[in-house]
């Protein structure tokens, strides 16, 4: 039925089937199959691997930056992709099925990558002798164009999938989620970094003198 997702349709007819199942003779039963059964089995098969994968990613991030704060910053930026993903699915009327779920998992990896690139540039600036304030500002400015270009190539690369009914959910999820999520990431990561490390809104006089001496 056009405009009706499988879960919505099933919720509407489930009470009728349950009532019919109660009237069946002894030894007979009814169970859902087809797309619902395949989708349920596929989603359940992902659960055992999700928790170990998330744990390994967090350990790698903590080991990469040798601190917990960057891992927390990255984790807090991932939900911004959900905002874009939700907007895209609602705007196009695309249901959130198993394929869209795969797209969401891929999208989270892309968001983590963008945040790592930005935080790594902050560390590079700090190693060069910049103050935290300047390190954040310079990192956001220098990584803005590369991050947006990487996101744009990914979005353009999945456009052909929009014409395929099976892959539409994945394409919309990645395109909308990555586009809006990248914008939020470039704003949220510097703000969260400044919040976690308590960087003042403006440079102190000592920081300005120190930067002047470096120049």
Image (spheres, grey):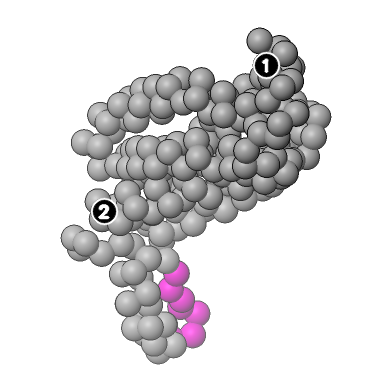
Residue 177 position by quadrant: top left
User: Residue 178's spot in the image, x, y percent?
Assistant: 42, 37
Residue under label 2, please give it: 91
The quadrant in which residue 153 appears is top left
In the picture, the disc for residue 212 is 1
Which image quarter: residue 62?
A: top right
SS type, badge 2: helix
Instruction: Tell me residue 65's x, y (percent).
Output: 75, 28
The boundaries of the magenta stretch are 24-31
Q: Residue furthest top?
A: 215
- Residue lying at 33% horizontally and 62% vertically, measured from the top left: 6
Q: Residue at x 70, y 34 (%)?
A: 204
Tally the marks: 2
Residue 87 as seen in the image, left or right of residue 2: right
- Select label 1 or label 2 by which is in front: 1
The disc, 1 or 2, on the residue closer to the chain's N-terminal end is 2
215 vs 59, nearest the viewer = 215
Q: Residue 215, image x and y in percent?
A: 66, 10
SS assignment at label 1: helix
Residue 74 visible, this orientation:
no
């Amino acid at each position: 039925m056009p405009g009706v997702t499988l879960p919505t349709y099933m919720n509407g007819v489930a009470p009728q089937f349950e009532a019919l199942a109660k009237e069946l003779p002894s030894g007979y039963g009814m169970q859902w199959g087809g797309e619902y059964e395949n989708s349920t089995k596929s989603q359940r098969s992902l659960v055992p691997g999700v928790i170990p994968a998330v744990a390994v990613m967090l350990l790698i991030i903590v080991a990469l930056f040798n601190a917990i704060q960057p891992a927390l910053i990255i984790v807090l930026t991932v939900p911004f992709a959900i905002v874009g993903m939700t907007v895209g699915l609602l705007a196009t009327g695309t249901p959130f099925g198993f394929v869209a779920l795969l797209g969401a998992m891929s999208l989270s990896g892309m968001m983590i990558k963008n945040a790592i690139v930005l935080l790594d540039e902050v560390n590079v600036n700090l190693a060069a002798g910049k103050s935290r304030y300047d390190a954040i500002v310079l990192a956001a400015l220098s990584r803005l164009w590369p991050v947006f270009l990487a996101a744009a190539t990914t979005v353009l690369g999945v456009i052909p999938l929009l014409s395929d009914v099976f892959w539409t959910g994945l394409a919309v999820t990645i395109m909308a989620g990555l586009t809006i999520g990248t914008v939020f990431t470039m704003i949220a990561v510097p703000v969260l970094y400044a919040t976690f490390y308590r960087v003042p809104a403006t440079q102190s006089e000592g920081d300005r003198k120190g930067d002047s001496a470096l120049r």
